[in-house]
Amino acid sequence: MSSPGKRRDMDIMKLMMSDWNVELVEENMSEFYVSFKGPKDSPYEGGEWKVHVELPEAYPYKSPSIGFVNRIFHPNVDETGGSVCLDVINQTWSPMFDLINVFEVFLPQLLLYPNPADPLNGEAAALLMREPQLYNQKVKDYVQRFARPESMADRNGASGGRKDSEDGDEKMNGGGAKGNESEGFLSSSSDDES
């Protein structure tokens, strides 16, 4: 079996050689951003999110930390911090998985099949259960406000925090800052939060 460092580098290279737009933060390749588009035939279609990824030293034996930088309305994503509640990343991660799985399978499934029974965003969960049409409309509104592909260039310049424009003025939000598992990211060591 190859060392964790070699496997990490190989997985990142596979991601970079695929159709994913990857922006490295550090030379050691343990932290980066990926441009992620909403799945077809979902209310997230047409949106593009900057997803922050941190790989622990023990990757692939320990799961990556994943967080949305720009806002998304979803029952299993913390709206203010961007952290993701996804069992396959937080609790059942296996070294058989790689980064391609995260972006081609796990995150699309999260957006296509939200789990309102295990929410990080109670408002989104309640709306999805009580009024699914209103939920879909609010998701589409968030896509228009925070996840337009043409605004990705703006977010690419701001790699330290979340840049949101809820009331028309730009502000930096502390969630999603690099290396902040307690506020911005959920990793395998944070099982009690999912």
Image (cartoon, rainbow, N blue to C red):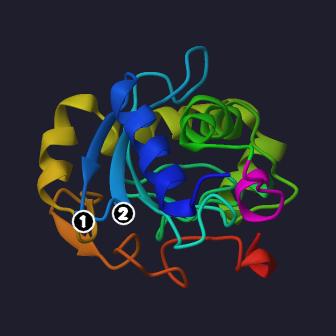
Tell me: 114 left or right of 79.
Answer: right
Q: Nearer the viewer, residue 189 or 162?
A: 189
Tell me: 78 left or right of 172.
Answer: right
Which quadrant is the C terminus positioned in? bottom right
Q: Residue at x 61, y 59 (%)?
A: 84
The image quadrant of residue 158 is: bottom left
Tell me: 150 left or right of 161.
Answer: left
Question: Is there any visible trace of residue 143 in the rendered image?
Answer: yes
Question: Farthest residue in the top direction?
Answer: 41
Which contiguous range is marked in magenta? 88-95
**Secondary structure mainly formed by the magenta segment:** loop
The alpha-carbon separation of the residues under discs 2 and 1 comes to: 6 Å
Query: CB of mark 2 within 8 Å of CB of mark 1?
Result: yes
Which secondary structure lies at badge 2?
strand
Give the residue pinned by disc 2: 31
Q: Residue at x 78, y 53 (%)?
A: 94
Magenta residue check for 90? yes
Give the residue pinned by disc 1: 26
Q: Nearer the viewer, residue 144 or 57?
A: 57
Q: Residues within 10 Å of mark 1 (few under 14, many from 20)?
A: few
Of callouts 2 and 1, the N-terminal one: 1
The correct choice, above or below, for 15 with respect to 51 in the image is above
Which secondary structure lies at badge 1?
loop
